[in-house]
Image (spheres, grey):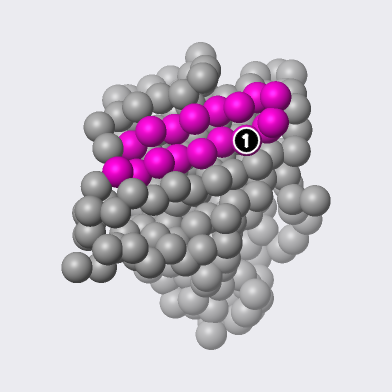
Amino acid sequence: SQTIHQWPATLVQPVGSPLSLECTVEGTSNPNLYWYRQAAGRGLQLLFYSVGIGQISSEVPQNLSASRPQDRQFILSSKKLLLSDSGFYLCASTPRRTYEQYFGPGTRLTVT
Amino acid sequence: RKEVEQDPGPFNVPEGATVAFNCTYSNSASQSFFWYRQDCRKEPKLLMSVYSSGNEDGRFTAQLNRASQYISLLIRDSKLSDSATYLCVVLDVFSGGYNKLIFGAGTRLAVHP
């Protein structure tokens, strides 16, 4: 079974600062990878998905970007954070030939 | 119309009660269906997959009605530990190997002594 790691677990950043969140997956190869954001008291919003190395698709235009430099590594970045970027960021993985999606423990980001 | 709609909640029930959550989806071509559970300030966790006419796993039973585009989750003999938000999730599959989960907003369940 796969394991999804995310770090950091919590982060407090000032407005205008850069962001880098990392997600790594163990126990599977060539998964589909996803970044979600969940604002306080709200549902999940899909931000990015990737079907392979270097292949990134964006669901919502914003000041965030994603990269997949290795098969099981997915990175979420921003050059300048906004207050509205605060939220719970979740990385998820769907192993090939399955449809079940599994989530990492998440990063709770507060932009001040 | 939202792609996946759930009962608004919250549901407040005593221990031992039976509670049912309902969910409807708009895309008749959706292929797979799931229930996830999310505890406060935690990641969603897969509770059950619903692939055919329904699944049963202990106290939990999920039903799917493709004709009505309706999914349900029944929890029998509720426990305090069942308190969480339950997310109805529908899978859409696209070309190129990409699959996308559409999440409902969730229904909160609070089980009290």
Residue shown at the point (52%, 70%) measured from the top left: A41
Q: Depth check: give the residue in front, A77 or B87.
A: B87
Q: Position of residue A74 (x, y in %)?
A: 51, 41
Q: Residue B63 colored magenta?
A: yes
Label the magenta part by its dominant secondary structure.
Answer: strand
Boundaries of the magenta span: B60-76
Chain on which label 1 sits: B
What is the three-letter code of the residue carrying label 1? Tyr
Can you see residue A73? no
Indicate the position of residue B33 as horizontal and vertical percent values: 55, 30
Relative to B85, A50 lies left or right: right
The residue under label 1 is B70
Rendered residue at 65%/50% (across/down): B5
In the visual, does A103 lie left or right of A48? left
Q: In this rendering, does residue B26 appear at all?
A: yes
Q: How many marks?
A: 1
Q: Kindly indicate the quadrant of the structure image that contains residue A68.
A: top right
Q: Which residue does the image show at 52% across and 71% down from the upper left?
A: A40
Look at the image and tell me in which quarter the N terminus of chain A lies. Answer: top left
